[in-house]
């Protein structure tokens, strides 16, 4: 790769089919999908490695497709992406586990929300959520206290880094390239494509696909004025040392801005809790332990015997939102030329959860726009 970077230095106006900005899980999936359709693809990444931001700072959950409005992009691409992702993991030996998830109600007022989740899951084609009594919740997860719950059997967990390495390998196998340490500095619409000027090379791309995550709105503003502002929702994750007291994921009823402080498991069986929601003005991954008491309060609602001494700061992640606090949740934005009028440009905005689950379906949708 170092030799390739050197050979690109000074290239001006080299013509390529597709430039994808961002080597997170969505950018790599998009690059792979385009390369497998026979297109020349360069994925440019400002960092020195793949998936160093949003894609490596999440819960690594394969979502079922429960929470999103019927016929929204989030609902459709999550359900389709889940199917594609399980198939991909099985055929490409990507570590994953279909462990299941319990969503729990801890007060009477939340029972109708559980019923709404059951209806929404069926409407979205996400599968049936099995209702659970308080006794059944405890039979499945003895450490959990709740008055009722629902079980999603199709929810799972995945090694996101192994997935990204596999996607990168597939991209490169089909002739694509990832250019690291390559930051986009300027974009110019040419009428028949986009001129992409980066820190090390300049390319004339027939198609530019903006998969820049947290920076996607800022990047799109260089080509079109009708772009939502970026909003950043920081989430903290705490590791729980020792043997995990859970065998499935455990989620409370969702809260504004996220899905609530929930239990996730890694493929080694280690438990972690998170994320919370804290709105910030700029990208900053600093872990702030000052809200530990609030975190513990949220956990104790469904896991009253949590041992505070086993709770340790782990990492933070930032959701790339396109709406701010107090506003209704936004759908994914996958906008091609028919939406914004810029030939050869596809922008992906607000690709937060379930972006990991939906990544392969998002990639196929982008490839279809390019092929149209």
Image (tube, helix red, strand yellow):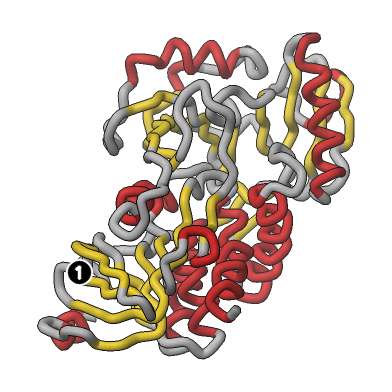
Q: Quadrant of the C terminus?
A: bottom right
Residue 363 percent location from the top left of the image: 56, 67
Residue 352 image position (x, y, % from top left): 51, 45
Q: Nearer the viewer, residue 163 or 364?
A: 364
Q: Is residue 24 left or right of residue 203?
A: right
Q: Residue furthest left?
A: 10
| Closest to the observer, 255 or 367 | 367
Q: Where residue 97 sits in the image (x, y, percent)?
A: 67, 54
Mark 1: secondary structure: strand
Q: Which residue is mark 1?
A: 198
Q: Residue at x 52, y 42 (%)?
A: 59
Q: Is residue 209 left or right of residue 285?
A: right
Residue at x 55% of width, y 68% of height:
366
Q: Position of residue 162 (x, y in %)?
A: 49, 64
Quarter of the image containing the N terminus? bottom left
The residue positioned 51% from the left and 90% from the top of the image is: 38
The image shows residue 116, relative to residue 127, as above or below, that is: above
* Quarter of image, res 28: bottom left
**Does residue 310 sit above or below 159 in this rendering?**
above
Q: Is residue 259 visible?
A: yes
Classify 10 Å Cα crowding around label 1: few (below 14), some (14-19), many (20 and above). some
Total labels: the figure holds: 1
Q: Is residue 268 visible?
A: no
Q: Quadrant of residue 138?
A: top right
Q: Nearer the viewer, residue 178 or 57?
A: 178
* Position of 260 relative to 97 (above/below): above
Q: Going 46% across and 39% down the picture, which residue do you hit?
A: 321
């Amino acid at each position: 790769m170092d030799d390739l970077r050197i050979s690109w230095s000074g290239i001006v106006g080299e013509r390529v089919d597709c430039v994808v900005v961002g080597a997170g899980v969505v950018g790599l999936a998009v690059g792979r999908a385009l390369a497998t359709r026979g297109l020349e693809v360069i994925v440019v990444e400002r960092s020195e490695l793949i998936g160093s931001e949003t894609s490596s700072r999440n819960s690594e959950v394969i979502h079922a497709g429960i929470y999103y409005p019927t016929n929204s992009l989030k609902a459709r691409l999550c359900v389709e992406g889940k199917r594609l992702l399980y198939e991909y993991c099985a055929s490409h030996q990507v570590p994953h586990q279909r462990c299941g998830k319990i969503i729990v109600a801890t007060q009477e007022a939340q029972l109708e929300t559980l019923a709404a989740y059951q209806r929404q899951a069926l409407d979205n084609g996400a599968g049936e959520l099995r209702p659970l009594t308080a006794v059944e919740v405890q039979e499945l997860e003895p450490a959990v206290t709740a008055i009722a719950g629902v079980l999603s059997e199709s929810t799972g967990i995945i090694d996101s880094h192994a997935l990204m390495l596999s996607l990168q390998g597939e991209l490169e196998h089909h002739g694509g390239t990832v250019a690291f340490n390559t930051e986009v500095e300027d974009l110019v619409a040419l009428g028949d494509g986009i001129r992409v000027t980066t820190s090390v090379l300049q390319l004339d791309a027939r198609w530019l696909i903006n998969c820049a995550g947290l920076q996607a709105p800022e990047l799109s503003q260089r080509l079109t004025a009708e772009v939502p502002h970026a909003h950043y929702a920081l989430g903290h994750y705490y590791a729980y040392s020792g043997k995990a007291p859970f065998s499935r994921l455990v989620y409370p009823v969702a809260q504004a801005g996220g899905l609530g402080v929930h239990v996730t498991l890694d493929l080694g069986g280690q438990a972690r809790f998170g994320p919370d929601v804290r709105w910030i003005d700029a990208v900053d991954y600093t872990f702030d332990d000052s809200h530990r008491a609030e975190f513990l309060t949220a956990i104790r609602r469904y896991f009253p015997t949590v041992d505070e001494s086993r709770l340790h700061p782990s990492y933070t992640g930032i959701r790339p939102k396109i709406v701010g606090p107090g506003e209704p949740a936004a759908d994914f934005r996958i906008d091609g030329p028919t939406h914004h009028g810029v030939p050869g440009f596809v922008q992906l905005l607000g690709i937060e959860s379930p972006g990991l689950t939906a990544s392969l379906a998002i990639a196929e949708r982008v490839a279809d726009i390019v092929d149209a």
